[in-house]
Amino acid sequence: MHCFRKVTDDLYWVGASDRRIELFENIFPLTKGVSYNSYLLLDEKTVLFDSADYAVGRQFLENVDAVLNGRSLDYLIVNHMEPDHCAMIDELVLRHPGLQIIGNAKTFPMIDQFFDFDLEGRKIVVKEGDTFSSGKHTLHFVMAPMVHWPEAMMTYDAEGKILFSADAFGTFGALNGNIFNDELDFDRDWLDEARRYYTNIVGKYGMQVQNVLKKAAGLDISMICPLHGPIWRTDLSYIIGKYDLWSKYEPEEKGVMIAYASMYGNTENMAEILAAMLAEAGVKKIRMHNISKTHVSELISDSFKYSHIVLAAPTYNNGIYPLMDNYLEDMKALALQNRTVAVLGNGTWAPQTTKLISAKVGEMKNMNLMEAAVTIKSSVKDAQMEELKTLSRQIVEEVL
Ligand code: FEO
C-alpha cells in the first residue's frame, strides 16, 4: 500500500525508508536505517525529482502511482546518478513510455553506463542557469559538481522557494513518519548521524560544498528537500551553518577527542590518565573512543567535530597499529585539516608508533602537531606521568 506525504499543496514526498540495511555503500554501519527521498510535483506537467534505491523500489513505485492517481509521469529530473537514487529509472521508463529525463551533460553518460534502455528522444540536457517550466513552477538548475559525484546538481523551484539539494543536507537515519525538521528534535536525535554522513561521504569535497553554499546564498530558499533524511522548512540557517563549518574544516566544539588502540590495556591506561587530567582541569568536552570497537566512520565524524585530537596506539609489526593506520589514512583521504593533534605511543622493545603517527599527521594539510608527545615502554611510569601532565596543561590552555 502507498505511504506518501504532502510537502506543499502540489508537492509530495514519495520516498521510503530502509531499516533492514546493515551497511550504507556496503561500508558504513547503519543502526537507524536510511531514507531515500523522492519528490513528485503535480503541476500542468508531472515532475519527479530523483527515484530511489532498489531496496525500497516497490514502496516507491506504489507511492508514485498513488500520487499520480491515473496521470502519466511526464518528467524525471535526475539530480544525482548514484544508485541509491537512480536505481528505479529504467522501471519508470517502462511504466511511463513518454517519460522525458532532465539531466546535465554528465548525467546521461552515467545513465548509459548503469542502464540499457534507449535514451534517444527522452533526453533534456540542462546546464547551469537553465530553467524549465512545468506550468505554474519554474525550475532552475544549479550545478553542484563533486558534491559528491561529478554530475550532481540541484534544482530550485522559484515558485515554492524550494531547493532540491541532492545528497547535500542529507543524513543517515530512517524517517519515522515525521519527515519535516520541525516535527522532530534534529539536534538531539539526528545531528550525530548527519555529521557522520557528511564527513564520510562528502567530507573530501569541502571546497566544492563551499562553492554550492555561495550559490545557494543567492537564492530565496524557504525549504530544502534533500535525498536522505528530514526536509528542512524551518531554521534553515542551523543546517546551513553546520555545512559551512564542516566544509571549511572548522571544528564545532572546542574539546578533545581521544582515539586509542590498546592490545592489553596499557595504552588505554595512558589515554585514561590524560582524560582524567583534562577533566580535573575543567575540560568538559572529552570524547574517548576505543578504535578497535568503534567504526572508523564514527572516528571521522568526531574528528570533524572536535578541535583537539589525541591519538594513542601501540607499535605493531614495527609500524602503526593497523586500525589506527586505517583511521589515519581515512582522515587523510577525507582531507581533514585545521586540528591540533597530540600523539601517545607504546612499544615494549622498539616503540616506533609515536614517531610514525606524527609523521603521517605531518603529511596532512594544516595540522598542528603538539610537540609534547608521550611514549611509554609497556606501561606508564612516573616519568611519563610528568610528561602527561605537561601535555595536559598545554591542551587545557588551548581548549579552555
Ligand atoms: Fe545518496 Fe550520493 O547518494
Image: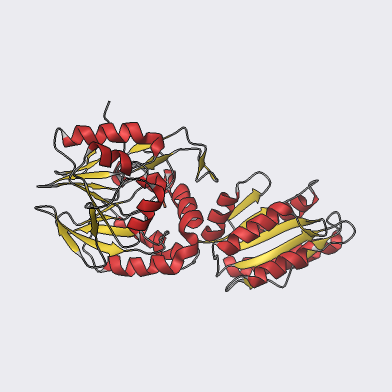
The answer to whether 177 is drawn above or below residue 10 in the figure is: above
Residue 295, x across and y down, in percent: 60, 47
Which image quarter is the N terminus in?
A: top left
Q: Count up the numbered dots.
A: 0
The answer to whether 366 is drawn above or below residue 114 in the figure is: below
Q: Is residue 255 visible?
A: yes
Q: Is residue 238 visible?
A: no
**Taking 221 as reference, is 262 left or right?**
right
Q: Residue at x 80, y 50 (%)?
A: 266
**Taking 25 as reference, is 135 left or right?**
left
Q: Residue at x 21, y 52 (%)?
A: 121
Residue 73, x across and y down, in percent: 19, 42
Q: Residue at x 48, y 36 (%)?
A: 21
Q: Nearer the viewer, residue 137 or 178?
A: 137
Q: Quadrant of residue 330?
A: bottom right
Residue 163, x across and y down, in percent: 26, 56
The answer to whether 139 is drawn above or below residue 9 in the figure is: below
Residue 270, x across and y down, in percent: 76, 55
The colour scheme used here is secondary structure
Q: Nearer the viewer, residue 381 or 377?
A: 377
Extreme residue toward the top, this view? 1
Q: Nearer the viewer, residue 202 or 89?
A: 89
**Taking 189 as reference, is 47 left or right?**
left
Which image quarter is the C terminus in?
A: bottom right
